[in-house]
Amino acid sequence: MHLKHNAMKLQATTTTTLALLILLLASSSFHVAMAGSAFCDGKCQVRCSKASRHDDCLKYYGICCAACNCVPSGTSGNKDECPCYRDKTTGKGDSKRPKCP
């Protein structure tokens, strides 16, 4: 009976350790994915340099840059330089809006 109890404790400990390891790996890969590339980080810094909501600007430009590998030049406009970026939209019909700022 004592051996059975120890085996159950070991199984619970192993399961907990495995779950924590999976969470750790998932969170570190998420951080790497959100870190962006040097190309996108640099282009987004320029694009967002005059934004009043700098952190939000960097977040959304980073997402669009990662998808399109392009950020329009300057701090606004020039979306024709990046057709993928320009043409990304959310919603359908009347609620269709640009996805990238």
Image (cartoon, rainbow, N blue to C red):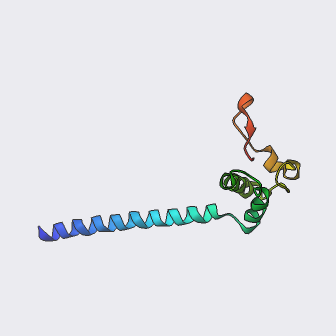
Q: Vertically, is 95 above or below 21?
A: above
In this picture, is 97 found above or below 61? above
Quick one: 18 or 62, which is closer to the camera?
62
Q: Residue at x 84, y 52 (%)?
A: 82
- For residue 34, side relative to residue 19 (left or right): right
Q: Position of residue 55 (x, y in %)?
A: 66, 55
Q: Name the spot of residue 50 as percent of width and height, x first.
A: 77, 55
Q: Which quadrant of the structure image shows residue 37?
A: bottom right
**Residue 80 in picture, x, y percent from top left:** 88, 48
Q: Nearer the viewer, residue 38 or 11?
A: 38
User: Residue at horizontal 88%, vertical 52%?
Assistant: 81
Which of the two residues, 73 or 95, is positioned nearer the viewer here? 73
Left or right placement of residue 29 versus residue 47 in this view: left
- Which quadrant, please, contains the N terminus? bottom left
Q: Which residue does the image show at 68% across and 51% down from the upper left? A: 53
Residue 97: image quadrant is top right
Place of residue 72 in the rendered image (x, y in percent of width and height, measured from the top left): 83, 54
- Residue drawn at (26%, 69%) of the image: 10
